[in-house]
Image (cartoon, grey):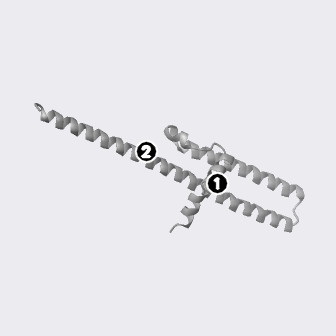
Amino acid sequence: MEHPYLFYALFFVFGYITCKAFYFFSATKKSISIIRSSQLIALFILSRALEDFYYAKEFRLKIMNESDDSKQNINAVCYLLSEEVSLFKRKSIKRIIEAHGNFFVQLADFNDWKSAMAFLEDNRKYITDFVTRE
């Protein structure tokens, strides 16, 4: 072999590029896993917040009924609270999707509250493991 150093250099370059490619694929896989996890955890926290909001709404309506507020006031509070919940859901999903940026936006498997809750339900085991794991 006339040029062994050329062979060594090419072998080194091939090894270096192969290492970088494997690192890139590994990092991409980890990034996608982190994004999926953060989506699920965020949706879980939002669903829990809405549960607490529902209990607060029921408590407020109970207090209003006990204090003999008019039906018109009670209906107005119900309407305002339902509008607030709708706005909260819309804005929350919009902010989660916007947080992905242009590069990772295709990783969002949902685009509204209903599809987000379906995504959360499909991944119930992950959330259960996350909540119960020490």
Compare residues 116 and 25 and report the one nearer the observer: 25
Q: Which amino acid does label 1 sit on?
A: Glu
x, y percentage for residue 82?
Answer: 76, 52
Whether 97 is drawn above or below 129: the answer is above
Residue of label 1: 121
x, y percentage for residue 55?
Answer: 73, 63
Compare residues 110 and 76 and report the one nearer the observer: 110
Q: Is mark 2 on a helix, strand or loop?
A: helix
x, y percentage for residue 88?
Answer: 67, 50
Residue of label 2: 28
Whether 41 is drawn above or below 107: the answer is below
Compare residues 35 and 93 and report the one nearer the observer: 35
**Distance between mark 1 and mark 2 Cα atoms:** 25 Å
Residue that appears at 54% across and 44% down? 99
Determine crowd level at label 2: few under 14, some 14-19, many 20+ residues with C-alpha closer than 10 A. Answer: few
Residue that appears at 56% across and 42% down? 98
Query: In the image, 91: left or right of 129?
Result: right
Query: In the image, 99: left or right of 58?
Result: left
**Residue 129 quadrant:** bottom right
In this view, the residue farthest toward the front is: 1
Whether 10 is drawn above or below 69: the answer is above
Residue that appears at 88% across and 55% down? 72
Whether 101 is drawn above or below 37: the answer is above
Q: Is mark 1 on a helix, strand or loop?
A: helix
Determine crowd level at label 1: few under 14, some 14-19, many 20+ residues with C-alpha closer than 10 A. Answer: some
x, y percentage for residue 57?
Answer: 76, 61
- Pointer 1 or 2: first along the chain: 2
Q: Which amino acid does label 2 sit on?
A: Thr
Res. 83 mark: none
Number of numbered discs: 2
Residue that appears at 67% across and 47% down? 113
